[in-house]
Amino acid sequence: MTIEDLERSAEQIRASDLIDIESGQISREIFVDDRIHKMELENLFPRAWLFVGHASQVPNAGDFFSSWMGSDPVLMTRDDKGEVFVLLNSCRHRGMRVSRYDEGNTMQFTCPYHAWSYSIDGSLVDVPGDLHGVPHMKSAYQGMLDKAKWGLVRCPRVHNYKGLIFATWDPEAPDFEEYAGEFHWWLDNLTDAFDGTEGETEVFRGVMKWRIKSNWKFVSENFLGDTYHGASTHASVEAVGIGPGGRGKRRHGERQNQGGFSKGRMKTSFRLGHGASDNLAYELPYPEFAEPELTEYFDAAWAKRAEKLRAEGRPLGGRGPATMFPNMSFSAGFPRTILVAHPISATETEVWRWFIVDKSAPDHVREWLRQYYMRYAGPGGMTEQDDMENWDYATQASTGVVARRFPYNYQQGLGREQLSELPGAVHSDHAIAGEVNARAFYRRWSEFVDNLDWPELTRRASVDDRVDAIIGREAAEA
Amino acid sequence: MTATQEGTTEMTSPTPMERMALHYEISDFLFREADLLDERRYTEWLDLLADDYQYSVPMRMNVKYDDVARLEQTREGAEVCWFDEPKDTVEMRVTQLETGVHWAEEPVSRVSHLVTNIRLDEISLPEVEVSCRFLVYRNRVADETDFLVGRRRDRLRRVGDDWQVCRRTLLLDQSVLLAKNLSIFV
Ligand code: FES
Ligand SMILES: [Fe+2]
């Protein structure tokens, strides 16, 4: 096979041919095939709004945090006017990664290779007598190099949503608000303080980063609405009980008198690809703690939040777990944490976890949460450890030539979707089972991977044909 | 070595022979402890941990040379670590391992804890501060293999004629964890 043959065969692949939403079947190829992975890197990640980091990681002028957007390393920085930038972390001269630090504070980024220097907002520094942006500017370039044109590539679209920094490389992409749609309610619950004060949250220092031998979509799908896996995958941690209620109490700390954790916990699926394991009407009060002073603190926060939101006519639910398309997942309750699944290859992912805390949290609350987060989540977390085992070996056992011939099954709740009050969304009809979220996620995924243009992407998301199907079905039943 | 009024012993200026004997005794204790872990004799292993045991594994970061002392590790007690927990949580982990449905360790991994470069940093009996290097090798299922290597500080306490670990801090030499999880005790 020549390179041209390979390229031609790659052209022939259509992501939409590999997913069959109507019958609930998805080809394993999309989780293991290198060509699909390349199409994702080219057509999906540079066009979607991606989570880069939290504003509280760069509180001061000159602060920076290293992150990734799809296949590209980026720097999230803050300049002396307080503006947050996202810059491609690759020198314009020969591509050297200008910063290999995870975070820090700097006056400028000086490339180690030939010392081109960039200011914190990415421009080629040129302050006479202070910094020299380009060594030998006069003799090497006769002073002709247009420094204004050769700064670090700046991400054209950056959006700060209550401290969450999102960015996209695509100048044509819709505004962040449109991209998020009504899913923003979950982002609000993630970023607002436990007592409902808007945006009054920050992250703990320390982002967990670890490698798994799994396709990134396993991770996104898991938090998108796979509550079905909990009973089996997390049987061991449930048996121990690591939750707020203390040893022997359930890991999420739900109260015993609320009629069961999952009653009414229908999932929410957005035509835009986002999904949540719960719905806004599912009002789950904060847990009861083994320590009475914590119960008191969180009861007061819940009461204050309930009062504020009810006054605004807002429901109190919507804590996730949830995934914002394509690869940012989070939980807005216990624990409260953000995850990004960075694609490394078709079968490898680098997972990052940030942990959120109220800015105003008193020390004992902060410390309780920190310890809970560590024993719950991340590679050492007693809950998350078992997820990785499943994602890795599911990926491995799906790479075989024969295995690839057999699609995965996504038929839970097929044709049983329920109407939602939220535009562009439907619900599952079952709290635990229901793969409606995954079906919508992969449909959106195929639309991006097949490189539909923005007018078409927007058009398709503007009418949720699932709603018509539900109305038709209900009419037929009546 | 002199006996104090409280009946504890203080090694203010141990002789070389006393130091060697203590070094030998403590090394032997640490090797025995590693065996208990690798043989999954968790109940016996937990007995070697003091009730006030604290287990910490800070995360490591790539920072500038000048910032290493201040910022290279996340801070125990305040920032996110791989582990930063009391004995109670360690016991929960043992309970989880013993459920038989903890899939991350089912089938069980093959684990070897190697302890080396042992030095007694501070002798103030009944406690001794020990520094060492660790190499934890894990192999599971077939080709899944992890090497966790780094420095370790242990604070040991003389209890009767044996020892207990009351503080353990490990510095793992990775910033991005290359193992998919940490379902074993490092
Ligand atoms: S590669 Fe950066 S200055 Fe040459
Ligand atoms: Fe899980």
Image (cartoon, coloured by chain):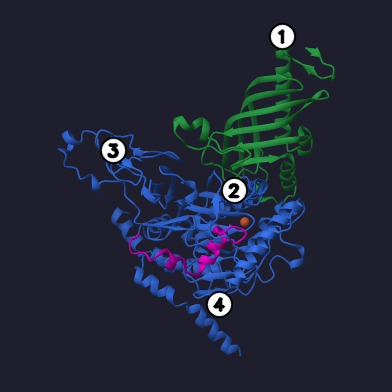
Chain colours: A blue, B green
Q: Secondary structure at mark 1?
A: loop
Asked if badges 1 and 4 are on one and the same chain, I answer: no
Instruction: Say if A122 sits above or below B71 in the image.
Output: below
Q: Which mark is residue A363?
A: none
Q: What residue would you read off at disc 3?
A: A116
Position in image of residue B70 (x %, y %): 52, 33
Q: Please provide the residue range marked out in magenta.
A: A170-196
- At x 57%, y 32%, the residue is B149
> Are circles 2 and 3 on residues that touch, CB within 8 Å?
no
| Callout 1 amino acid | Thr
The answer for how far apart the CA atoms under marks 2 and 3 are is: 38 Å
Asked if badges 2 and 3 are on one and the same chain, I answer: yes
Q: Secondary structure at mark 2?
A: loop
Label 2 is found on which chain of the structure? A
Q: Secondary structure at mark 3?
A: loop
- Whether the residue carrying mark 2 lies under 8 Å from ligand 2 is answered with no
Q: Residue furthest left?
A: A142
| Callout 4 amino acid | Glu
Does the segment drawn in magenta span residue A194?
yes
> Are circles 1 and 4 on residues that touch, CB within 8 Å?
no
| Callout 2 amino acid | Gly
Q: Which mark is residue A378?
A: 2
Q: What residue would you read off at disc 4?
A: A421
The answer for how far apart the CA atoms under marks 1 and 4 are is: 80 Å
Label 3 is found on which chain of the structure? A
- Whether the residue carrying mark 3 lies under 8 Å from ligand 1 is answered with yes
Label 4 is found on which chain of the structure? A
| Callout 3 amino acid | Trp
Q: What residue would you read off at disc 1?
A: B15
